[in-house]
Structures are given as C-alpha cells and as structure tokens.
Amino acid sequence: MNNIGVESAFDVLVRARALEAKGRSIVHLEIGEPDFPTPAHIVEAAKQALDEGWTHYGPSSGLPELRETIAAHVARTRGVKVDAQNVAVVPGGKPIIFFPMIALLEPGDEVVYPNPAFPIYESMIRFLGAKPVPIPLEEKRGFSFDLDRFRDSLTDRTRMVILNSPQNPTGGLIPYEDLKAMADILRDRDVIVLSDEIYSRIYYGDEAPASIASFPGMLEKTIILDGFSKTYAMTGWRMGYGVMPTWLVDAVSKLMVNSNSCTASFTQRAGIAALNGPQECVTEMVAEFRRRRDAICQGLNEVPGFRCPIPGGAFYAFANVTGTGMDSKEVADLLLQEAGVACLNGASFGEYGSGYVRFSYANSLANLNEAVERIKKVAVRWEPAAVRG
Ligand code: PLP
C-alpha cells in the first residue's frame, strides 16, 4: 500500500471545504467534473428501469444491449470494426485503468506514459511493481510528446503505453500526425496501448480527436477507455467502458466477478438511453465549455506572470506560472488561501507538471470571472518580479 497514490483534487477539495466551514468564500476550480445536471431523458430512463425491475445482478461484462450500443458507437466514432464481444462495461472509466493493468503488468515491466497526466496511471504502475517511464508533455508542442524521445523510451521490457487525448490536466490533444507516427513505432512491438479517451466528445476544433486504434494493425493491441462521466455529466453514476481484444475482455470480466460482480443494472439501461438518445445535450455542454474556456484563458493571460495556452479539449486550463518567480505549489496554495480560488498544482500530475497550475473550468462563467478578478488582486504580491507571459 505504500506504493499506491491518490488524487490531489480530492485533497484540495477537503482543504477548500474546511475553509468554507470557517466562513470563507471559495470558487471551486479543482475538481474535474461537469457542473451540469445529467440530461433529463437519461435520468428518466434510469427511473423507468428501476420501475421495470432492473435492480438485480447482471452479466459481469455488462448488459448485452448496452455492449452492442457501445460497440456501434465506438465503431462509428473511431472508424474501427468492433462488436459487443470487445466491450467491457465497468463502474466508471477508472476500472479500465485498474483492471487491465492488474491483468497485464508484472513486476519489472515498463510502462511508458505521459507526464503530467491523470495521477492514477503512475499510482497503478507503482502499485503493481512495474517501472514508470514518464514522457514529458511539452507546452511548445501543444502538450504532445517529443516523438524521438517516445521512440527512445521503448525497450524490450515495455509492456504498456498509455496515451490520453484530449488530456487531463493540459487540455491538449495529440495531433493526428503524431498518433500516426506512434502507431508506426508501436505496430510491430509486443505492447498494449491503453488509450484513455474519456474526453473524446469534449473538443473545440472541427475534427474529432483521433484514436490510435483506428490506424492499421493497432486495434488488436489497443484498449480504448471511454465512459459516461464527462460526456453526459454522469460522474456519480459510475459507468464506463473499455473496448479491447476479447481475451482482455475475459480478463476484465474475471476481475469484475472478483470485485464488483457487475455494473449497476438500472444505470446501464440509462447508458443505452444516453448513447441512443438526442445528443444536443453534449453539443450544448461543449459550446458552454468553449465560452468558459475562452473567458478563463483570456483572464489568466492578463495575470502578470501567467501564460495560458488555449486548450483544444477537455475542460482544463493549464497555466504556466513560472513567470511569477514562485513555485507552482506556492502559487496554488496562495490562490486557495488568499484568493479563495481552489486549483491544482501541476506537479501533482507528475514532475513535468511543475511550473503549471490546473484550473478546471467546469464552473459558471460568473464564477470563472470572479476567480480571475480574485487572482488579479493577489497577483500584486508577485507582480513586481513577474515576467509577462
Ligand atoms: N481518465 C482521465 C484522464 C480522467 O481525467 C478521469 C476522471 O477525472 C478518468 C479517466 C476517470 O473517469 P471516471 O470518473 O469515469 O472513472
């Protein structure tokens, strides 16, 4: 247990709540979950499912109808040939990190993964005694990998490569050409790619983010992680899925039998409604996120010493705060304590996140504007030394 990590977002939330309990006003930009309600037709489908008696155990890999619906959705959106047998439905996106890593990794295996990134990757690598091989995400490359470094990091012990696009915490997307180059590098190697696409529907360009699974020869070695939490504002429902080769579905299914038995049946019925129902709710949510992204990035870029690239996806602004002359942990602490703005030190996503602060813009425009005003007020502390971004 000494090797397993946690998520600092939850720690900061606890600290922020403690300040609120003392009467302080806090703008919450730490937690990564859409602030919208789950769309009404999805809630209705769950209520109906409860009334119809979907209240019992179900198959450990998920209800057949949901697995079929997911397979059709992933086949369409990624341009790949998959069917229900390739789908494992699990309680959230996270178990598609946890279970396949348990199934695949042995002590000493190497795992190449982005840094900064979702902290659970490194936590699980260390927990299983595997060797973390972090590749820095570089701001100057739009938070993508240096491909030479990526190639050089692969060895005979590399068992898994983790990719995440759109990314947490940077909001960056891996460009199509980079994914293509990575597919060329990986195609003939005995590795599994865990492609975390939980933000696949939250992007601001014209083109949907590409999946490495769609390049020739990659589907049979890729696990696509996706789910309902972010796309349909369903974080508390706990429902996600992985699309993977059938032998891995069997492994995940066995781990499900040994842990959860199955994902809740009535929520899965709601999942069918989410994927088959109207998608305007997603379009409207993304349009609102875009307005917020533009507002917060503009505001943060006006703060002395801050430089905030415009993210192409997810709902995070990842501001470079090195111009303040302060450590990013100090900046995040100061923003919480003095400005009442809860945000996350980039280093809590890995060492290469040092110098950055993550702001989740899953909050109202009014609160985002308030947060920027508060940050500008405390910026007088470092302003004389600040280098304008
Ligand atoms: N992957 C990434 C990159 C995430 O940011 C998150 C949630 O924050 C997850 C996976 C897990 O999603 P879920 O809440 O569905 O388990």
Image (cartoon, rainbow, N blue to C red):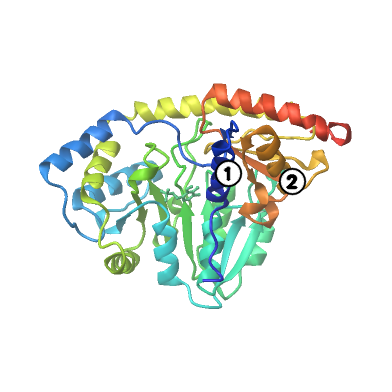
276 sits left or right of 139 in the view:
left
In the image, residue 225 sits, relative to residue 278, either above or below, namely below
- The x and y percentages for residue 333 are 69, 44
In the image, residue 95 sits, relative to residue 197, either above or below, namely below
Q: Total of numbered circles in the picture?
A: 2
Residue 388 in view in this figure: no
SS under mark 1: loop
**Label 1: which residue?**
175
Amino acid type at image mark 2: Glu
SS under mark 2: helix
Q: Which residue appears at 72% of the width and 43% of the height? A: 140
Q: Which residue appears at 77% of the width and 31% of the height? A: 379
Residue 90: quarter of image: bottom left
Q: Which residue appears at 22% of the width and 33% of the height? A: 44
In the image, residue 381 sits, relative to residue 223, either above or below, namely above
Amino acid type at image mark 1: Pro
Of the pair 327 and 207, the residue shown nearer to us: 327
**Label 2: which residue?**
330
Q: Which residue appears at 69% of the width and 34% of the height? A: 308
